[in-house]
Amino acid sequence: MGTRLSEVELPPVFCPLESAVHPHVRQIEKRAVEWIGASGMCASEREKAWVVATHSADFYARFTPAAEDDDRLLAATLWVYWGFGFDDVRCDSGPLSGRPAQFNALAGQVQRACETGLAEPADRYARALQDVMRRFRSFAPPTQVTRFVHAHRAWLSGVAWQIGNQAAGRMPALDEFLALRLLSAGGHPTFALLELATGAEVPDREMNRPAVLALTEMAIMVASLDNDRYSLHKELIRGHTDQNIYTVLMAGRSLSLQQAVDEANKLRDRILRRFLELHDVVRPTAGADLSVYLQGLRHGIRGNNEWGQRVPRYLSLGHWPDEWEDLSPAWAEEPSDLRPGPVEGAPSIAWWWDADLG
Amino acid sequence: MGTRLSEVELPPVFCPLESAVHPHVRQIEKRAVEWIGASGMCASEREKAWVVATHSADFYARFTPAAEDDDRLLAATLWVYWGFGFDDVRCDSGPLSGRPAQFNALAGQVQRACETGLAEPADRYARALQDVMRRFRSFAPPTQVTRFVHAHRAWLSGVAWQIGNQAAGRMPALDEFLALRLLSAGGHPTFALLELATGAEVPDREMNRPAVLALTEMAIMVASLDNDRYSLHKELIRGHTDQNIYTVLMAGRSLSLQQAVDEANKLRDRILRRFLELHDVVRPTAGADLSVYLQGLRHGIRGNNEWGQRVPRYLSLGHWPDEWEDLSPAWAEEPSDLRPGPVEGAPSIAWWWDADLG
């Protein structure tokens, strides 16, 4: 991008949501790290160190601070570690990152391994995934597992889209990027873990309500744009020209990096404001399990921020991950943009502002 | 493949399932043909002629012979015409058939158009899809629409996988091919239309029962393998070396075409036998709406055969489609293979034979 982070001012984060972390986070982390070693998914000590350094236990303990069953929370956490590992080694920066033909085939086989424990995938990540799925099936009803399976496919389809653009040297326009980012950051499976981790069983008629689908998509989008923010430092240092909200806005609207940072922050705040507004309409009518799920969306947006501002995944620049940084994130008191939606130039997400939703 | 169809003996089809066709098939066809013209999805009269010649009205009238609402049946039928058109122009033999990067991006945008009517896709097929989706949303509950949306993504992910293999010159082994074919032939959305066309609303706890998921997958697989059979004539004439059950078996097991035809027929019959067996276990315990759905799977397998043996899509070789052939399909009295499952060398589908399923 030709700019240093020191030349860019990142605004504080507007995030008026509840902060909490599960009290058993250390125990869960210990068990998860043992599993990572035993699972065989990492090819080297260095690969394992990076997976462990994602601090996924901290991440997911913030999504589900009140989960009652440690085994459930552990299984959900294992998927998060797995997802970050897979992303690093097979998606974002691995050898397949510019090879859509090969990635499509791998994604197909990984997804099938997600669906059936009897598949015999050659890929070490696919095999580790089967163990996580067996845990889910052991304690969750088929509907919750099926929802996760669908969310998993949505994620892989987004990664395939991103890898395709990268291979074709194609920088998407804002609208396409938002539709892509909704999938590629893994938000769908991460939030589908909420039911698996907490034991909530949201009835179909509530989970598929357009307003609840919109809330889920908005939570995903806010978290995904926040991740673009936390990745910015690394992207700048590495000179990446990957697809992220900043490169997309700079290319599409001829903006400087600082202008793109400010524009992205406004876009993100407008989505969060709509999330908060719609949440407050839906929540009073929600059943008990839907309430747990909606609270998980709120915790997830907040927790992703608390985690993302400190995690070596986004901060470390060396061969090995640095220590966990103990920073206090800077929070904004007010949103950066008070305009009503829908956001201009983004028809793919315009439906979030439908008056019919509530 | 270097062999003529006249040199290959295609065995008769084992298909002991109910045959029926909706009485309003002609009226539905007339309305669908008008829509195809008005939708703007076809770029030329010739493209339109091929879409019309898919006889999708006949096809889907056989899946849902007892559908009570013509508008619902029409909307489902429109999607089938649309799906065949999209497949021909954008997937199988269009300019994207060997370009996974471009296809992944198109698939992402088409899928988003499936999800929200407010998206503004540039692609003419994506725009036509939005009209079909609006119809679904006008009469179906969100859960049935959501199921279709997930099924739609599954299909596109399979096409992306197939196109990736094609681009990489990669002939999959049998197990990978079966997992791919389960997705790429469009069986998931076609059977997800059953609820939309009939108005059945299968409760989540029944629809996501492993046994029901297995029955759905088996119905898809039998129909997909049957489609490979009906495409064989055209494939041979055109000298295609595309991925189908015959090329996969010939390459993987060093078989002649005749041997591959016989092997594929046995494989297909073993799956159908397991479908019939498991159906008879599940059906007596099924609620009314699940019964409608299961009967639709049966009608679909049968109807796909009755349609596939006559449709110009698989038979015509010229620039324009030939007339609909009025042939009487040849049926086998007995299955070609009585061995119990699971099928050897196909762990991806082994779970269909799990004793736990019933």
Image (spheres, coloured by chain):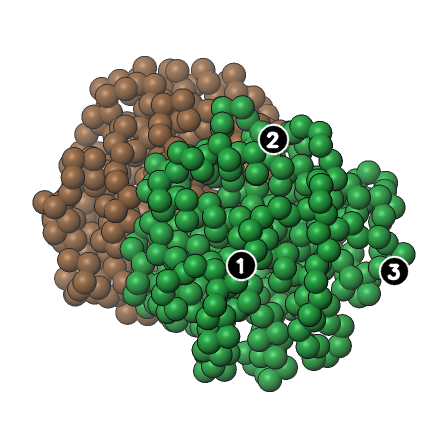
Chain colours: A brown, B green
Residue B230 in the image, given as x and y percentages of width and height: 71, 58
The residue that label 1 is drawn on is: B20
The residue that label 2 is drawn on is: B350
Looking at the picture, do discs 3 and 2 lie on one chain?
yes
Residue B350 in the image, given as x and y percentages of width and height: 60, 31
Asked if the residue at tag 2 contacts the one at tag 3, i.e. Cβ–Cβ closer than 8 Å, the answer is no
Q: Is A246 on the left-hand or right-hand side of B47?
A: left
Q: How many other residues sit within 10 Å of disc 2, few (<14), some (14-19) or many (≥20)?
A: some
**Vertical arrangement, residue A217 with respect to residue A340, above or below:** above
| Residue sitting at the far left | A284
Which mark lies nearer to you, 3 or 2? Answer: 3
Amino acid type, mark 2: Ala
Which mark lies nearer to you, 2 or 1? Answer: 1
Residue B238 in the image, given as x and y percentages of width and height: 80, 66
How far apart marks 3 and 2 lie (CA) works out to: 35 Å
Which mark lies nearer to you, 1 or 3? Answer: 1
**Vertical arrangement, residue B21 with respect to residue A214, above or below:** below
Asked if the residue at tag 1 contacts the one at tag 2, i.e. Cβ–Cβ closer than 8 Å, the answer is no
Amino acid type, mark 1: Ala
Q: Nearer the viewer, residue A38 or B63?
A: B63
Q: Which residue corresponds to the image point at 70% horizontal and 71% vertical from the top-left?
A: B325
Q: Which residue corresponds to the image point at 74% horizontal and 39% vertical from the top-left?
A: B336
The residue that label 3 is drawn on is: B6
Secondary structure of residue under mark 2:
helix
Secondary structure of residue under mark 3:
helix
Which disc number belongs to residue A271?
Answer: none
Looking at the picture, do discs 1 and 3 lie on one chain?
yes
Residue A153 in the image, given as x and y percentages of width and height: 47, 44
Residue A154 appears in the rendering: no
Q: Is A347 on the left-hand or right-hand side of B161?
A: left
